[in-house]
Image: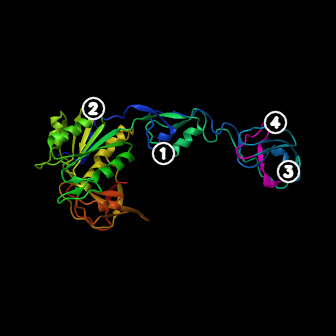
Amino acid sequence: MLSVEEAIAAILDGADALTPETVSLHDLSSRIAAEDIHALITQPPFAASAMDGYAVRFADVSIGAELKVIGESPAGSPFVGKVGEGEAVRIFTGGAVPHGADHVIIQEDVIRDGAQIRISDAQDKPGNIRPAGIDFKKGDVLIRAGERMHDIHGAILAAANISRISVVRRPKIALFSNGDELVEPGAELNPGQIVNSNHYALSAMIRAWGGEPDYLGRASDDENAICSFFRKASDADLIVPIGGASVGDYDFVKSAFKKEGGDIVFEKVAVRPGKPTWFGKFGDARVIGLPGNPASAIVTAALFVQPLVRRLAGESKVGAPVFHQAELLTPLKANSARESYLRSEAVRASTGLAVSAAANQDSSLLSPFSKANCLIRRLANAKAAANGDTVEIVWLR
């Protein structure tokens, strides 16, 4: 039985970013850049006024000085000409500063009289001009290959005159549930039936990690039926069966996987919850089989599915979970021989992070996730922990 660290290493072994594709700026949020992206223009491309006022020579703006207004420079319609001694050009925010001017005096600091202005307030130094390239210059690297883009990157790239970019293709993640007892939300429940809920959480998590979830439906507890779902998922980059991962009389997922030609790499992980988690390869696709209990499915997805999805999506620096130190606010019992992950809530405190574990950690419970934003890691055979002790946490969301 593999440790958590060994299982993650096996899952990521040989996994590389998928092929790039070109997308518009409307489709880049949370995508990974496939190459360095360089600015095509300088921004701003010209010296621009930061205020409404008058473009002048700073040498001419002593109090009481009168200047002749020779034109105007609104945004998008630059003044053609040069500002000479004793001259001014009416300018507006974003307008191009005309040649010869090195200062924009704000309109509140002058008195306008026809084609003349008189300086009414002292000016300390030249200002109110945004130099060309103050944001970035042509050729600057705006986004590095492997960087995940966020909502504002679209505006940055648009300002750089870029309309389409090369990103890593989103990995297609095929999911299917297994179990005769499962029905979809809204159905009338017969005795012994439960609502099929796990795939809603897992699909949302996969999407947040940069994947493209494709829920195929529910497979009944029949080997041939499960085989058909593996065939449906054969074009996916990753297949995630949910349930049927254990060794009960009605757990046929792994046998169906083998029947369809899949190769199992490992069948168990020394982790609680989620011991039956398994991993294999199915042609070009990888397969991570998750237990059906809600907590087991969600916790093992965070530990094992997340790094693979992010690696396939183009993040190169992805591996074992990153742990943070937190002060424990709830006592914990000694741990068993399996590394354990407890649904918990971490908050910012004056001394750093403080964390409370949910009172009931039963693997069938979903409600603890409503407040849980992290998992406390308990190493195998860890001793009991008291309030105030330091524990390790990994962020869940």
Say if 259 sits above or below 382 in the image: above
Q: Which residue is mark 2?
A: 284
Give the CA distance from mark 1 to mark 3. Answer: 47 Å
Magenta residues, start to end: 92-110
258 left or right of 210? left
- Element assignment for label 3: loop
Give the CA distance from mark 3 to mark 2. Answer: 75 Å
Which amino acid, mark 1?
A: His
Reply yes or no: does residue 98 show up in magenta: yes
Q: Position of residue 100 (x, y in %)?
A: 80, 38
Front residue of 212/221: it is 221
Q: Residue at x 16, y 36 (%)?
A: 258
Give the CA distance from mark 4 to mark 3. Answer: 20 Å
Front residue of 312/85: it is 312
Front position among marks 1 and 3: 1
User: Nearer the N terminus, badge 3 or badge 2?
Assistant: 3
Q: Are marks 4 and 1 in contact (CB under 8 Å)?
A: no
Which amino acid, mark 2?
A: Asp
User: Nearer the N terminus, badge 4 or badge 3?
Assistant: 3
Label 3 neighbour load within 10 Å: few <14, some 14-19, many 20+: some
User: Nearer the N terminus, badge 2 or badge 1?
Assistant: 1
Q: What quarter of the picture does the C terminus occupy?
A: bottom left
- Element assignment for label 1: loop
Q: Are marks 2 and 4 in contact (CB under 8 Å)?
A: no
Residue 70 appears anywhere in the view: yes
Give the CA distance from mark 2 to mark 1. Answer: 30 Å
Residue 318 appears anywhere in the view: no
Q: Which residue is mark 4?
A: 82
